[in-house]
Amino acid sequence: MIQEIPGNVRIQVPEQLFLKDPDSSELGKRIVKNAIDMIYELGFENFTFKKLGQQIGSSESTVYRYFENKHKLLVYLINWYWGWIEYRMSFAIANLPDASDQLKAALKVVTEEVVEDSSFSHVNEVLLYKIVFSESSKAYLTKDVDNENKQGYFKSYKRLCERISSIVLTINPQYPHAKTLVSTIIEGSHLQKFFSIHLPSLTNCDKNSCDDTDFFTDMAFSLIQK
Amino acid sequence: MIQEIPGNVRIQVPEQLFLKDPDSSELGKRIVKNAIDMIYELGFENFTFKKLGQQIGSSESTVYRYFENKHKLLVYLINWYWGWIEYRMSFAIANLPDASDQLKAALKVVTEEVVEDSSFSHVNEVLLYKIVFSESSKAYLTKDVDNENKQGYFKSYKRLCERISSIVLTINPQYPHAKTLVSTIIEGSHLQKFFSIHLPSLTNCDKNSCDDTDFFTDMAFSLIQK
DNA sequence: ACAAAGTTAATAGTAATACTACTAACTCTG
DNA sequence: CAGAGTTAGTAGTATTACTATTAACTTTGT
């Protein structure tokens, strides 16, 4: 069940990722909405600003007025996604007094498949989830990653990992691999989802119900409690 | 310690990945050797056949005679890498009667950093390892993955995972997540290596001694023996 | 020995992509 | 309603991925 997000909340994205805030105009929102549709349809490599311009009945350079290049647009989308996940996680763990319950709830939000569009925004979260698990590593697997990291391109992701790691450390302050564990779980869960669809011989997950939440939750607690 | 590979052994790569076997000529070997150097130097995105042609004192189209495009060249290199790893793994587990010892040895080969060039071939394994952990997921994260999979582009990788999974199942035939566990470990180990260098806040691994073999070995045995 | 056949590699392209400079038009402010 | 600022479209350029053609060299059969 996806947490309903109230109308007065916006997912914040680091402003160095856009030239003009796509959230500030109708055209900007259409750019983001259609970018998600098209990256999902075509894959990131085959997606171009020219095609996007055509799709929104405008021109290539219009898109360039919002985003410097398609790589930054991808990074923008991924930051939006992690911001959204962190928001949902905050709700999921709110008022849970026990750290183990918090970790369970957090891992559920992070590893569970997104199947429902929360429709609180112009963003289609179901498609964005599919983009994230099949394209998001391209955001950091570049030669420019160190520079981009310095400029805050991965802020949202790092903050989310940091928050979950701190729950782990609440459960066991002596556990020395909290960050390694959390990043392995988050990326691993996306990987399994991708494998279940495209390379099924590499996973035990089923295409239709890739339920790896149990697997990764079990992994976390087995390793922490030692 | 890297297993010395005798001169009469060749790492086999599926032949649909090249137009002319680069192992069959001096020029082909120079193409592969320099491709590894340049992909490492420039990153896969900035690497082009034109630049490679210049590097080897030849032309772009010469490279095209060996490889259909740069994506296939990357897939070729990655298949070579996994073929090489499987070869080393075979040696590492040979004559070990106990399945748990076999798994330990296999995970060591798969997760340990490659720091020594075995110099049995024209391939620089240290650089190739760096390419694999920072570029290899681009080989399958494409829109054409299903088709490429059918054509055997990921053969070597799948065979390696299959072999390690079967060791897991020897230890515990009831364990239902053998394949998920193995692919999570292999990809996770590369991810941690990348993070330790470029996004250190996402890992507890150290840049200089990213020793995640213990972490992943512990993970495997904790989950299997339940 | 040497013509025919096959192999190899360089030249010179094309189409598509990523990105930019410039200009026209519209809008907001005093 | 003049002038400043904003927005978006046209028309480019440089680079990239890839291909068609041709020239030259090597091998093979008689």
Image (spheres, coloured by chain):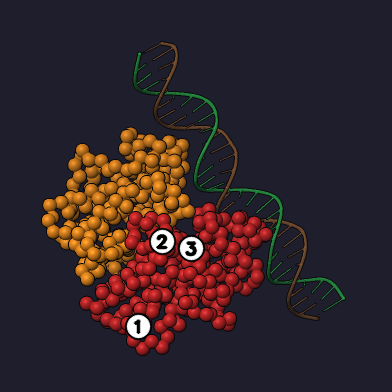
Chain colours: A orange, B red, C green, D brown
What amino acid type is highlighted by mark number 1?
Asp
Q: Residue B172 in the image: state x and y as whole percent.
A: 27, 81
Q: Residue B110 in the image: state x and y as whole percent.
A: 41, 73
Q: How many marks?
A: 3
* Left or right of residue B12, residue B215 in this image: left
Q: Mark 2 points at which residue?
A: B207
| Disc 2 chain ID | B
| Label 2 neighbour load within 10 Å: few <14, some 14-19, many 20+ | some
**Which label belongs to residue B131?**
3
Q: Which of marks 3 and 1 is nearer the N terminus?
A: 1
State the residue at coordinates (34%, 68%). B184
Residue C7 placement: quadrant: bottom right
Q: Nearer the viewer, mark 2 or mark 3?
A: 2
* Left or right of residue B176, residue B76 in this image: right
| Disc 1 chain ID | B
Q: Mark 1 points at which residue?
A: B101
| Label 3 neighbour load within 10 Å: few <14, some 14-19, many 20+ | many
State the residue at coordinates (55%, 78%). B10
What amino acid type is highlighted by mark number 3?
Ile
